[in-house]
Image: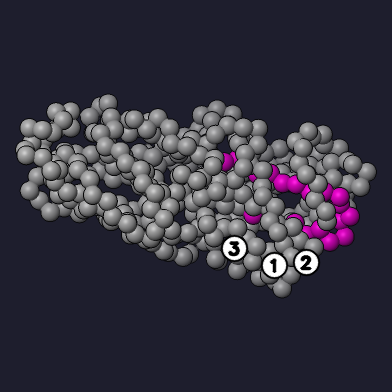
Amino acid sequence: MSFRRILIYLAGAAALLSGCGLVDEKLGDCGADFEAQYELELVTNMTTEIQTQLSLAADISVATSLRSYLKGIFTDFAHDVDLSFYGVSADSLRLKHMSEVMNANQSSYTFYIPSRRYMHLAVANLLDNGSLSLVDSLRCHSSRLHQRVADTLPPHRTGLFTARLAMEVVDNQDQRFDVRLFMANCAAALVVDTLGSGLRDIRAVATGFATDFALCDSLYTFSHSPVFKADRLPVEGGTQLCFATVNFPSREPEDVKSIIETEDPFVSEGAESSLWQWRVYATLTDGTVVETRLGVLNPLRGGQLRIIKVQAQPSGSVQPGSSEMGVSVSIDWNYNDGFPEIDL
């Protein structure tokens, strides 16, 4: 596992006011000087996974392309930060909010915050994600990252980092708060060897991932199973194709589950115990489309990359190299997605 961090320093300063009487009564008493140190912590298996799964000479081009695709995801660079400070009473209303574009490894802001107890929530790299939004953020316990709804979704375009911290700002004390932000999304890659298959077209999607992430509770929820249209990466030479997507994590196995289930539980046909799926659509020379569902039995967690290698067959199905996956094949599958064809 690799471990990297960046520091974002925020220094709070006393407001340029003549006394506590000018402070909004809803926010409480006097303000105080304080420093908050934000650590964006990237703990990922990306390097190990690529070295392990793409170790052959034939894999070099795929490995290079995948590293390039993921360099903006598994990164210790913060483009933007969204910071919210909530009251700790029953209504948990947001009392202070700021959103800044950083474009740097470290930056500092000066702001005023009244003395009181807070629950602090932070999100980094949300602005250009393209697929997620921060919703219901006026109250602490409802604030969450929400996956937009569509028939098929594009992958996330940024690595999301979040943090939560209970803090108490007090008068006449030098204070520093350490806030650690951890990665909330992850990535999956499918490598398809087309040697000898004679297929006309291959496309891939992935499904079985969370739809929401509650910031205060650090819990994922699953209201449905969003389908992500995987990006096909440019690979020079060889017979391999590489598809990749970035998304929220999958469910956990039942014995270590730490998530909330809502409705429409994810069930893999032909792989009932799987936690998430790759779905591969291969077009034969006669136009017939064959769907293969690859049910993955191991969870995909925040900060992780999972690479799966499969072999395309002349019949249109794809076969994984590992027996620890469920496989279901549908022949003469009909689709109207309008995906572009891929020259093999």
Please identify the quarter of the rendering in which residue 9 is found: bottom left
Residue 10 seen in this snapshot: yes
Kind of residue at badge 2: Gly
**155 in the magenta segment:** no
- Pointer 3 residue: 67
| In front of the other: 299 or 60 | 60
| In front of the other: 194 or 82 | 82
Instruction: Please state the horizontal and vertical placement of residue 312, each as a whole percent of the image.
Output: 81, 54
Instruction: Please state the horizontal and vertical placement of residue 77, each as a whole percent of the image.
Output: 43, 58
Residue range in magenta is 189-209
Specify which label sits upstream in the sequence, 1 or 2.
1
Q: Quadrant of the C terminus?
A: bottom right
Residue at (34%, 30%) from the top-left corner? 138
- Pointer 2 residue: 237
Residue at (17%, 49%) from the top-left corner? 13
Instruction: Find the distance from the CA under tag 1 to the CA under tag 2.
Output: 8 Å
Q: Are marks 1 and 2 in contact (CB under 8 Å)?
A: yes
Kind of residue at badge 1: Ser
- Pointer 1 residue: 61
